[in-house]
Amino acid sequence: MRSLRNKNIVITGASSGIGEQVAVKVAQLGARAILIARSEEKLTKIAEQINQQASVNCLYYPLDVSDIEQVKLVFNQILHDVGSIDILLNNAGFGIFESFAEASLEDMQNMFNVNVLGVMACTKAVLPEMLKQHSGHIINIASQAGKLATPKSSGYAASKHAVLGFTNSLRMELKDNGIAVSAVNPGPIATNFFDQADRSGNYVKRVKRFMLHSERVADRIIQLMIRPKRELNLPWWMNLGSVLYLLFPRIADKLVGGILDKK
């Protein structure tokens, strides 16, 4: 088990939810939390709160990860400011739950720009230094939706399938370079993600009792930082559905297809 003390940890999507929780908790463990999100106002408040309690100064950088040129500039500035990045948590992302017939291509394009290309751009920005130092850890927040697609989530599920494909390929490419690559596949989490994803509120009502708490998810991600592994699936039992679909897709369609239609 390794310590996070004095590690530089970049967290995208750090202005709320899992990202904010992870930032606060790693700072309590002596790491430098480096916050990235679009809202400078929210980042300022979180950084101030962390710096009142933490022994290592928290830094923040306003950034929309879908802006690839800005990603390059901001990460160059981070490396200039702190020297190296030990862990990258690609957490920024959003979803919109609509049937494909009703969904707009613009919304789906925006999901891919943030959920997929944003992940790739941030990873591309940290990778050269990690390769030089022969160490590092890249953690991509994917989703159970990336393993088991459900109705009314075609665009979101496709983006998370892409994140998983990217993560798995990158892991194999870097296996001899001292760099760990992990995917986190959570089920629904009680955060403001659903303010946009589930505008009707129907999905949240139907799955509320199954929702994960962001603080608990953050704790598990920090455990993953301390002890890297290939995948973290939350909750464990939800991953059984994706395994069933992988092994017996036709049977699974008949047995549980209706259960998955909660949106």
Image (cartoon, rainbow, N blue to C red):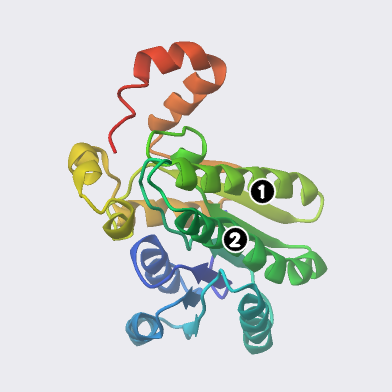
Three-letter code, disc 1: Phe
Q: Is the residue 163 above or below the residue 22 in the image?
A: above
Along the line of sight, which residue is nearer the eye, 192 or 55?
Answer: 192
Q: Residues within 10 Å of mark 2 (few under 14, many from 20)?
A: many
Along the line of sight, which residue is nearer the eye, 145 or 138?
Answer: 145
Q: Is residue 11 left or right of residue 235?
A: right
* Disc number for residue 119: 2
Q: Secondary structure at mark 1?
A: helix
Q: Is the residue 146 above or below the residue 22 in the image?
A: above
Contact? badges 1 and 2 (CB < 8 Å): yes
Q: Is the residue 64 above or below the residue 61 in the image?
A: above
Does the image show residue 229? no
User: In the rendering, at what x and y percent does residue 204 appear?
Assistant: 22, 45
Along the line of sight, which residue is nearer the eye, 67 or 164?
Answer: 67
* Disc number for residue 112: none
* Disc number for residue 166: 1
User: At 36% across and 47% down in the image, what residue appears?
Assistant: 97
User: In the rendering, at what x and y percent does residue 167 appear?
Assistant: 64, 48
User: In the rendering, at what x and y percent does residue 158 appear?
Assistant: 53, 43
Three-letter code, disc 2: Val
Q: Is residue 238 left or right of residue 87?
A: left
